[in-house]
Image: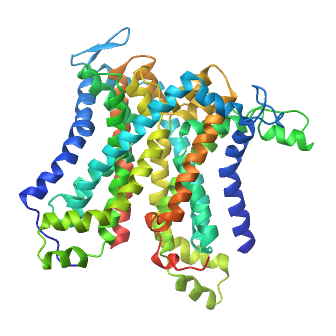
Amino acid sequence: MSEVRRPSAGTKAVLGFPLAMLGIFFLAPFGIMLATSFYHRIEGGFYEPAFELASWERLLQPVFIERTLFSIGICLLAGAVCIVVAFPFTFFLTRMRRRPHVTLLVLIMSALALSEVIVGFAWSVLLGRAAGISNILVWLGAMDEAAAYQPSFVAVLLGLCYIAFPYCILTLYPQLSRLDPELTEAAQTMGASPWRTFWTVVVPIGRPIIVAGFLLAFVFTLGSYLIPTFLGRPEHWTLSVFISDQATFNANVPFAAAMALFLTGLSLLVVGAVTLVESRTRR
Amino acid sequence: MRPLKCILTTLVVLFIVAPLVVVAVVSINENRYMDFPPQGFSLHWFAELWNDIGWREAIVTSLIVALFSAALAVAIATPMAYVLRAYDVRLAPILYSLGILPFMLPPVISALGALVFWNSLEHSGRIENIIISHAIFFSTLPLITVSLAMETMDRSLPEAAQTLGANPRTTFRTITLPLLVPSMITGYAAAFVLSLNEYIIAFMVSRFSVVTLPIKIVNDLRYGFTPTIAAVAVVFILIATTTFSLFALFGNLLKFLGADPAILERER
């Protein structure tokens, strides 16, 4: 590649449009959210300019702390389940012949593009009493009576895994597809079983992307809104649900803004950690 | 290892496909309840999607939002990807991160940000608000596809044009831009499909006055199940699988996903 040119004034102007759009519609709202978080809430859905810490103080209330810990807990668990399944699966996937390889990728991308609305609805049917797994089992004679498996903790966890799993595969895929086949072949020539090769060669090489994929799946599930509301009871609701309910149904926008900024901080910490891990592996 | 590979792959495929198959089965049920095994076969729930004014309006609204927001997303992402990759811009990594960030953060944050933004301008609950919010949120996708195309582009082509006397503007218009078009189309398609499917941003920005398809589904589900919801879910599943199958057939899905070039030469 030839040397990279220095930008002229004209090329800098080209950057103006995207930067203005991001500045006005992405960064400015953060400023407004920050200001709003100090505003005074008026009963009935409005708020007026003021400077009070009431919304931020509510972040220290046991209800909020409990919701935060629950959200972090279930999303970490979902991220862990996803990465444990996605890592070996993606490794096998990258070693398949072209046709099954592409077919599986189309399937995964399609699942990734599906709305949470569709995923939540589909799982609520699958785990429900009317036309789900239990009905199939009754029909086959393996069960006496249909049962509902949602709403429940496990249902929320399955839903979260469903939306994060394709995402996880896509973060692992580029690097696993580049893993030199000679490495695993060398280990096997020297007498290591395929199983042992996987654990002693593939997993250690993949450790940084395992960490990155796990953390990205964690942030991704943290953003889920409909899965916890469709498949869980109120005690299974996560921060995203809490924030949007405060903003829409309870009409407490200042408190929602404080929580959203807290969630931004939490997500930025995790994304920052991912970037750090990835920049180490590039070297 | 081999049996493990087969078992794992089967389980993963079952996990992904099972909920979709169940929804498809429910959608062709003849009466208006969920039955298993399904009673009869009927496609009239699909016809209902177009015959019912509420569903039809939601479909049209969603299509308008997706068409325009994806176009705006490409318009934001393309100049950014081009300048940051073609020139030595100070702060380029930070600017690129800024472009990636909206999509990385939980969508509820962008949703609330847009809500307070439009509230403060007293311009809330309009369709253009959803279009702009979706464009910003999904501009990450064309940013990634166009940046990838810039990185893998053969640099000798624009250089040859310049050697032959074309000025930078002509070079961009006749060489670089045509080479970027496929990546702009993939970025557009990805942003379009995801915008069509997006719920939380549209819901919070719309303030109950604009109804997109996902919002309509959730609203209807509050009053209970109807087979029409299953039918619309099937339509969504078909749109997603068709888009990515076409992508795999005519575009280069593997390259887009960052596969090792060696895989591209693998036997079928």
Q: Residue furthest bottom?
A: A190
User: Residue at horizontal 13%, vertical 67%?
Assistant: B168
- Total number of numbered labels? 0
Q: Position of residue B177 (x, y in %)?
A: 26, 62
Left or right: where A252 falls relative to B28: left
Nearer the observer, B246 or A227: B246
Q: Position of residue A108 (x, y in %)?
A: 57, 56
User: Residue at horizontal 45%, vertical 52%?
Assistant: A216
Nearer the observer, B108 or B140: B140
The colour scheme of the drawn protein is rainbow
Q: Position of residue B130 (x, y in %)?
A: 37, 32
Relative height, residue B74 to residue A42 (above, below)? below
Left or right: where B143 falls relative to B17: left
Q: Residue furthest left?
A: A9
Quadrant of the rendering where the C terminus of chain B is positioned: bottom right
Q: Is residue A244 visible?
A: yes
Q: Position of residue B237 (x, y in %)?
A: 60, 45
